Amino acid sequence: MLVILMRHAEAEKASPRRYPNDDLRPLSASGKKIQRAAAKALRQMKIRPDRILTSPRLRARQTAEITAKTLGLAKIMGEEAALGERYSLKAALSLLVRCKPDETVVCVGHEPDLGKLAQALLGSDFSIKFGKSALMGIEFNRRAARGAGALLFFYRAQDLLRLV
């Protein structure tokens, strides 16, 4: 199994006046452009997800939609509260355990949640932080499990821009 953790792209600045519900804050124009490049980098790496799971928050959904569209995979996307407002390590791990052992799964979420999930999957005791549009690939012999993952790659947005 390959799990790709992806932080949402750059969103509009938080503004209680413009976005009283922060869950509805959209991506910025720059964020959309960078995310298209990140998705193109995935395509160049010949990574073709079997499913894309995303936080229900608008900025994460838009990131997942751009990724799915760029990869030609619009019908494989699903929203998961365990990657958004109902995040807990237990819920996120449970979500991954339900995936098939031969799948490639992209999980689009937020910080600090993704860093904590990556730390648990890798069995790491050091802090992991995801920048906007960052991608981390973690491989498992079978199903995803705490401490059973092997780090394949960890790209920042600026690294991905150099790949395309």
Image (spheres, rainbow, N blue to C red):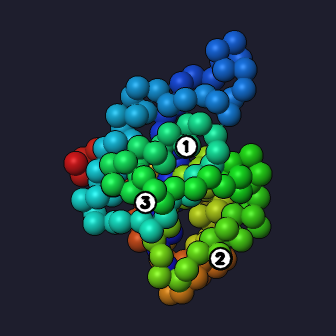
The residue that mark 3 highlights is 154
Residue 72: x, y in percent?
A: 33, 54
Query: Of 133 and 56, which appears nearest the observer?
Result: 56
Q: How many marks?
A: 3
Relative to residue 73, is residue 122 drawn left or right? right
Q: Is residue 25 above or below residue 115?
A: above
Could you say which disc has been placed on residue 43 in the image? none
Residue 152: x, y in percent?
A: 41, 71
Q: Determine the CA span between mark 3 and mark 2.
A: 22 Å
The residue that mark 1 highlights is 61
Type of amino acid at the residue the image marks with label 2: Val
Residue at position x 45%, y 68% in the image: 50
Q: Nearer the viewer, mark 3 or mark 2?
A: 2
* Mark 1 crowdedness (10 Å alpha carbons): few <14, some 14-19, many ≥20: many
Q: Determine the CA span between mark 2 and mark 1.
A: 22 Å
In which image quadrant can residue 92 be found?
bottom right
The residue that mark 2 highlights is 97
The answer to which of marks 3 and 1 sits earlier in the sequence is 1
Helix, strand or loop for disc 1: helix
* Mark 2 crowdedness (10 Å alpha carbons): few <14, some 14-19, many ≥20: some
The answer to which of marks 3 and 2 sits earlier in the sequence is 2
Q: Determine the CA span between mark 3 and mark 1.
A: 21 Å
Type of amino acid at the residue the image marks with label 1: Arg
Q: Is residue 69 visible?
A: yes
Q: Residue furthest front?
A: 75
Q: Residue furthest bottom?
A: 141
Relative to residue 37, is residue 134 drawn left or right? right
Residue at position x 56%, y 37% in the image: 59
Helix, strand or loop for disc 2: helix
